[in-house]
Structures are given as structure tokens and as C-alpha cells.
Amino acid sequence: MKIFISWITKSLLVLMATLGLQAVQAQGLNFSRGSIDFDNTVAGSISPEETVTVQFFGPIPPLLNVNSITPPANPAFTVVNNSCLEGLYPQFEPCTITFTFTAPTMAGPVSDTFSFESTELGVESIILRGSSDGATPQTIAFTSTPPDPAPVGGSYDIAATGGESGEPVVFSIDASAAEICSVTNSTVSFLSVGTCMVKANQAGNGAYFAAPQEQQSFAVTAAPTANPGTPEPVPALGTWAAMLLSALLAGAMAVLQLRRKGRRPSGS
């Protein structure tokens, strides 16, 4: 009987010691997940939401005063929802934090923390880790050729292809050529003599870098002078006009002859 009681006593002592050790280990802020490793690596992709439950385990005092909370500084980690705030944390009352990870354009691993600071326990953190394969470069190529000549008052439909980001290629005029030409959508208008410089840009997104700017330059020339044209030919006289003119000439000759006869010298 004594042996049985002794065995029970030892078992209780072992159980109490085990429970006591677990209590010590559980003291402070307990995170349902002490770290999160996000799986998505494609640049620009956003991970599924990941939630961590936070609880304060005593033993004493029954309330923990959280002085400050520091969210992740890296913009790749986003706090979608957060019910864990600064102030008093009663024992065993949970709060939750939900995170997402957006893989950045630069390749490589990314890490940060979500931290709680208290006078009693110091800093305790949830570790956040992710990685990115990196964004892909893209380029712009002009597919149209400016007219030659490009006279003042004319216009030109400019065209270019971009990369695979799906963002549009946007045209603009360089500041140095603002008085030489203008662009509306993809139509370049020629305003005055000089060098027109059109710039082409394409934005990036999470998976693609912005394309390097491309430029197209060409000369705008003076407008051509107006053609004076060919003088209109004098219309030919009609038959009746020729007969009338002939009759008039004959009459004039007859009058002239009569006048000459009337002026013969005296004594003839």
C-alpha cells in the first residue's frame, strides 16, 4: 500500500512539474503561428490571406499592457485586418491579424516582422517571409515612319508596339519641340519649322518593369508655296467675228482712199 501511495505521489509530482514547465513556456503573448512563409513567387502576384491568432497567457498580472505595435515596414507584406491594438490584453482573450504577400519586382527573398512591445515581456514578433522571381523587362519599338517631307499644316499617324505587360504605349512631345509639333492620341500635327521629337512610354506592373523610353525625331519643313497656275488661252474668234473684222477693215480702206483723192494738188 505504501509503495502504491509513493508511486501516485511521484506521478503527481512529475505531472505538476510538467504542467508547470508548460505554463512557463506558454507565458506571454502566444501566436497560433510564430512565422508565415508565403508560397507565391511570381512578381506582382498576391498570396492568399494568412491569419495569426494572438493571446496573452499569464500567470501574473492578469492583464498585459502592450505599449506599442509595429507592423511590417516592407510594402510587400500587407496587413489586411487587425484586431490586435495597443493597450491592455486580458488573459486568454484572442485577437487576430491577417496578412497577404505581394511578390515584388526585384528578385530575391523578403522578410519582415509584426511586433508587440510591452514593459513586462519586451518585444515579441511574428516573422513574415516571402520570395520573388523578379519582374521581366519589356521594350518599345516604333512601327511607323514619319513622312518626308513633313510640311507645316500636315499630320502623321504614329504607331509603336510595347511589351507584354498589356499597358498601352503612350505618346507625348518632348518639351524642346512643344512649338514644332503636337500629338493627340496617336496623331502628330506639324505646327512650325524645326525638329519634332515624339516620346513613347509604357508603364509596368507587378510582373513587368516599365519599358525604357523610346524617341522618334524628324524634320518639319515649310509648307509649299501656292502654284500660280497656267494662264487661260484667249479664245479663238468665231467665223462671224472674223467676217465682221474683215468688213470693218475694207470700209476703213475705202474711206482712206476717198480722202486721198480729195487732196490732189491744184492745177492738175
Image (tube, rainbow, N blue to C red):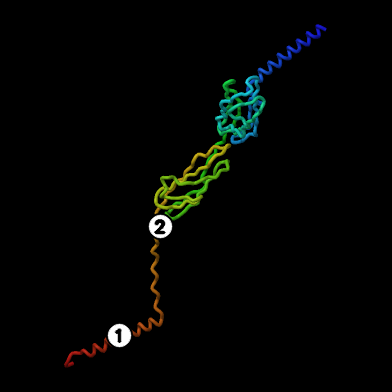
Specify the farthest residue to the bottom.
267
Residue 257 lies, in percent from the top left, at 26, 87
The residue drawn where x is 56% and y is 28% is 70
Q: Nearer the viewer, mark 2 or mark 1?
A: 2
Please provide percent x and percent y for residue 197.
44, 46
Residue 109 appearing in the image: no
Q: Quadrant of the C terminus?
A: bottom left
Amino acid type shown at disc 1: Ala
Q: Residue at x 66, y 28 (%)?
A: 94
Residue pointed to by mark 2: 224
Q: Is residue 261 above or below residue 128?
A: below
**9 left or right of 203 in image:** right
110 and 64: which one is in front? 64
In the rendered view, would you say 226 is above or below 197? below
Q: Nearer the viewer, residue 100 or 56?
A: 56
Nearest the viewer among 25 and 177 is: 25
State the mark number for residue 252: 1
Q: Quadrant of residue 6?
A: top right
Residue 211 higher or lower than 88, as above or below: below
**Mark 1 falls on what kind of element?**
helix
Residue 199 at x, y = what percent? 47, 44
